[in-house]
Image (cartoon, rainbow, N blue to C red):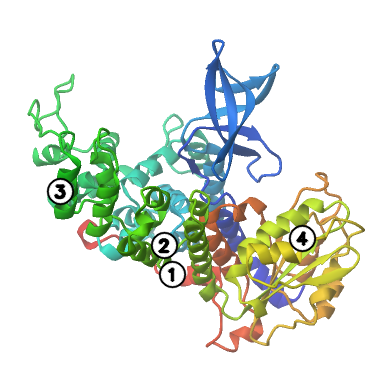
Amino acid sequence: MTTTNAALNEKLGPAERILQSVLTYTDHMVHNRPGLVMKDGRTIVGVRWDYASWKLEEGVKVVYRLTKQGNKTTRIRAGVLGADGRVTEAGLEVGRWQAPGLFPEVAEWMYRQVAEVWKIDNEFSARWASYQFSQEHRDLKVVLAAFMLVQSRKGEPVMEHGRMVFHDDDYRDVGEAMMLIYDRKDDARKGLDVKLLLRIRELLELPGIAAINRELGFGKSARHAFLGRWVKAVHRWLQYREENPNLLHGLVKAGFKTSVVELACRSGYEPESEKFYEILRWKQTQAKDGRRHVAIGKAVKAAESWDKMTEEQICRKVMKEKPGWKRLISLIPPGVGLTRAIMAAAIEAGCLSDKDLVIATPTIEELGLMDVQDIKDRWQAALRAAEDMRAANIAARVKGKEAKEKLAEAAETALKKAAEEAMKAMRVYVFVDRSGSMEASIEAAIRLITRMLPAFPSDRMHVAHFNTLGQEVTFKAASAAGVAQAFRGIAGTGGTDYGAGIRALERHKPKDDEDVLFIFVGDQEANVFTDVVRHSGLRPMAFGFVYVAGNQQLLHRAVEDTAKDLGIPCFRLEEKMFEDTYAIPRTLRALIASTPVSHVARQRPARQRVTLVETIARTELLEKPAWAA
């Protein structure tokens, strides 16, 4: 290993952990549906979550795993649910019942990754939290905010010879800032809403998280979870909204009333005036110890109701008041329902954001509003503005061919937007193991490449499959059909030589200022291929490895050992990351951003990519808003 590579690898220690946190189990720390948690050695956390429900049969609760393909849901019996939450079948434990909410194993794993980075570099972890605040991965933001609120660097005085010489850095301020910055419109998408503020506490109260904090010396109690500055930050958050009633009214109108009440209760907030309770329509009763003194017994205004309104009256009210989509849905009386006229009025009044319109596509289609040109134009404009791949999931729920095609096109456009900046001065090579034991890797590669291909410029993404012979794969179209056609007739057979795959693509040399990422799909049961990579002239800066289960007891680690020989990072990826439609853009951006920048590329600042580590290291620490300082 060269000195340069050794230094680079040392620097990449925390970056690789960040990448794992960002890419692995993305958006799976919280499930809003019940599920079945089962042991699974193929996952990093050792378990997996499956959507499930139970049905009372002959006096016992029978649990069924639910899988959905398109509009069809398949029920598979898993076992019987006991009073202790365990699910058993024929006397054997299958797993445990998991209520909606935090998935403890994943939450604890993510928190542990943050803790490991903190132990390596306190300041870097604070900058990571500051950087992540502007990103869209909400679960990771919650984990980082929680950690920053409790970690031990809190601005304490530093003494020398009995005198204070200065105050230590206060990184808990970063956690507070993540909770409090939410007022300006440009920060609204980045900020943590009231539900996420509650989730931070739920996370810190998980037994596994509390144990990690005790292990790190955060807090002193062995009986109670340490919350750090959570209570203090929540009090500031609530006080600011009490002092600015329009903000509190806005939360009520947006449907957050119950969450605000819970936040006040969980933090022990005591408002200054009765107005706080009036706006929340929260009737107060005296506590047993008589400590309460504001608005005791005072009547509150009844919640707004549209129950006695006709369809015509509702349409007029929608056009006049323009309520937000979520609030509108909550107010429509069941006896009327969401009719064609109400939906049309809501779209015309601007009650639905671009994202709301995309999500509501099946309803718009069902109500026959795709035939109304003005509405169709508005819907198409929303698709063009799509920032994520939500449309790909929604396409499975619509019937019309045109709507399906438009949704698929919107998803591909969103993916291209996400990867466009990250792909600057970047070239990607994908190698698919098609040896005898790897029939599954071909299917996995088809799914992976189908997701990736639309995002990458065709002249900077190269694909090959290999056994003992490597062959380049070309695509007639950058689409699912194009990928399926390119792999048609290819079966798993023969031995395994990763070097054959490299040789099949070595004629596609990268430009001098381009960085290179290799992605392998297989089980790496082969010998190292270090010399082939060096002689190819392709000079990869990092490997990505999608493990497809072949031999569970790995005897060889060809990809990881080759990366080690070359002195470059190898990022372990899970295939299901690319099944999560919403996470694909973030996955690709983070993977590319974590690939080191070559020495040659650094000589050309105009084209240079900036790695994730460098981006984070340059991020200014978040500061609390002026009103909270």
Is residue 380 shown left or right of residue 270? right
Question: Compared to 439, does 71 lie above or below?
Answer: above
1 or 2: tag closer to the N-terminus: 2
Check disc 4 and report the residue beneath it.
560
Which of the two residues, 227 or 296, is positioned nearer the viewer here?
296
User: Label 2 sits on what residue type?
Assistant: Ser
Regarding residue 162, the answer to whether it shows in the image is no
2 or 3: tag closer to the N-terminus: 2
**Marks 4 and 3, how far apart at CA:** 62 Å
1 or 3: tag closer to the N-terminus: 3
Check disc 3 and report the residue beneath it.
317
Please state the horizontal and vertical placement of residue 403, each as a whole percent of the image.
47, 58
What is the number of the mark on residue 619? 1
Image quarter of residue 168 = bottom left
Which of the two residues, 99 or 488, is positioned nearer the viewer here?
488
Question: Compared to 629, does 208 lie above or below?
Answer: above
Q: Which mark lies nearer to you, 4 or 3?
A: 3
Q: Which mark lies nearer to you, 4 or 2?
A: 4
User: Label 1 sits on what residue type?
Assistant: Thr
Tag 4, which secondary structure?
helix
Quadrant where the N terminus sits is bottom right
Is residue 85 shown left or right of residue 186? right
Tag 2, which secondary structure?
helix
Check disc 2 and report the residue beneath it.
130
1 or 4: tag closer to the N-terminus: 4
